[in-house]
Image (cartoon, rainbow, N blue to C red):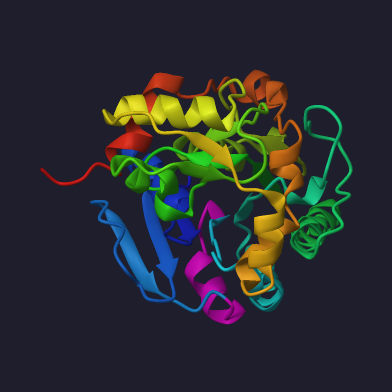
């Protein structure tokens, strides 16, 4: 069995995918523009512009799977960054014959009534959701035309180790240590699925290596929905810090601030995530892969552990 794998991106998902693969005896290359190290023993790190389809194809040659774990963190540049990056990844997968395993997002669904399940139409209207839907549609078309073997895994908002300041939950912990109120988007008291980033990696690898799973979307097995207030209190407890008030940012404040902040303008387009239940149906992946989510207490402990201050 081919045990050579190439990962593009060294964010939380990319690092956990690399760690999972190495632990199972695989040869792993992590490619980033800078070539920075993940700190994981046994991983080869490569400085590579992943929009260069020729260079990426050479790197992926002979690989069992090519993992798209890229995460352009700045929403305001997605329209410029994602199309050439996705096109190069798809071309490299086609040239190399590697399975193309995509770390997806729930944005393509847009606002939905009821739990999000595989098979729902990608019906987003905001540009981020429309863009990510188109990138999967391109991969799916290539798969259906037998040009590549493609699969996409979608999870909800990340918790767990390595998420850092980009996480809705983890970004609240430093302020809470100082007794500051946790201000959150939307309502603090609506059910919301949170996905452990390590479970994203486990599901992505399982989907890449299972030929019967290709050509479709899978949802990452995730713990039962919790409200933002419940989740924050669980993490505060795990971190050993006193609970602080959890309040929703008034819509008027968010609207006013977005006039001056491009990032907040982007976030406003996703406010439906926090103003209605946002629940993931993961039954298909649990049944197909036999994966269960990491126990919630452990997730909270790992979420808290990486935000503890040094002794």
Q: Is residue 181 above or below residue 190?
A: below
- Residue 149 visible, this orientation: no
Residue nearest the viewer, comparing 89 with 76: 76
- In the displayed structure image, the side of residue 162 where residue 196 appears, left or right: right
Residue nearest the viewer, comparing 7 with 96: 7
Q: Is residue 148 above or below residue 174?
A: below
Q: Is residue 65 above or below residue 57?
A: above
Residue nearest the viewer, comparing 155 with 181: 181
Splitting the image into 4 quarters, where does residue 37 fall? bottom left
Q: Is residue 25 above or below residue 43?
A: above
Q: Position of residue 281 (x, y in %)?
A: 72, 26
Residue name at image x 27 percent, y 51 percent = 40
Magenta span of residues: 51-66
Residue name at image x 48 percent, y 58 percent = 7
Splitting the image into 4 quarters, where does residue 223 fall? top right
- Residue 259 visible, this orientation: yes
Q: Position of residue 285 (x, y in %)?
A: 66, 27
- In the displayed structure image, the side of residue 299 where residue 146 appears, left or right: right
């Amino acid at each position: 069995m081919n045990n050579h794998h190439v990962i593009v991106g060294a964010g939380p998902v990319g690092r956990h995918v690399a760690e999972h693969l190495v632990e199972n005896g695989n040869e792993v290359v992590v490619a980033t523009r800078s070539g920075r190290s993940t700190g994981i023993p046994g991983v080869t790190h490569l400085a590579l512009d992943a929009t260069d389809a020729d260079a990426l194809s050479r790197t992926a040659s002979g690989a069992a799977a090519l993992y798209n774990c890229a995460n352009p963190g700045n929403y305001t540049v997605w329209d410029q960054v994602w199309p050439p990056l996705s096109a190069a990844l798809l071309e490299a997968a086609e040239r190399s014959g590697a399975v193309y395993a995509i770390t997806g997002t729930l944005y393509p669904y847009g606002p939905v009534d009821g739990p999000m399940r595989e098979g729902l139409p990608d019906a987003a209207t905001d540009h981020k959701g429309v863009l990510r839907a188109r990138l999967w549609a391109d991969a799916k078309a290539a798969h259906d035309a037998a040009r590549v073997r493609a699969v996409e895994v979608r999870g909800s908002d990340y918790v767990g180790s390595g998420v850092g300041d980009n996480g809705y939950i983890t970004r609240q912990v430093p302020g809470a240590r100082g007794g500051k109120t946790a201000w959150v988007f939307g309502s603090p008291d609506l059910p919301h699925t949170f996905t452990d980033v390590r479970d994203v990696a486990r599901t992505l690898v399982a989907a890449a290596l299972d030929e019967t799973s290709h050509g479709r979307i899978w949802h990452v097995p995730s713990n039962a929905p919790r409200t933002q207030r419940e989740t924050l209190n669980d993490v505060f407890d795990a971190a050993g810090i006193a609970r602080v008030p959890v309040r929703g940012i008034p819509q008027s404040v968010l609207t006013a601030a977005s006039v001056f902040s491009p990032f907040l303008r982007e976030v406003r387009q996703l406010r439906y995530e926090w103003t209605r239940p946002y629940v993931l149906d993961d039954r298909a992946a649990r049944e197909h892969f036999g994966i269960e989510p990491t126990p919630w207490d452990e997730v909270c402990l790992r979420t808290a552990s990486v935000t503890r201050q040094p002794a």
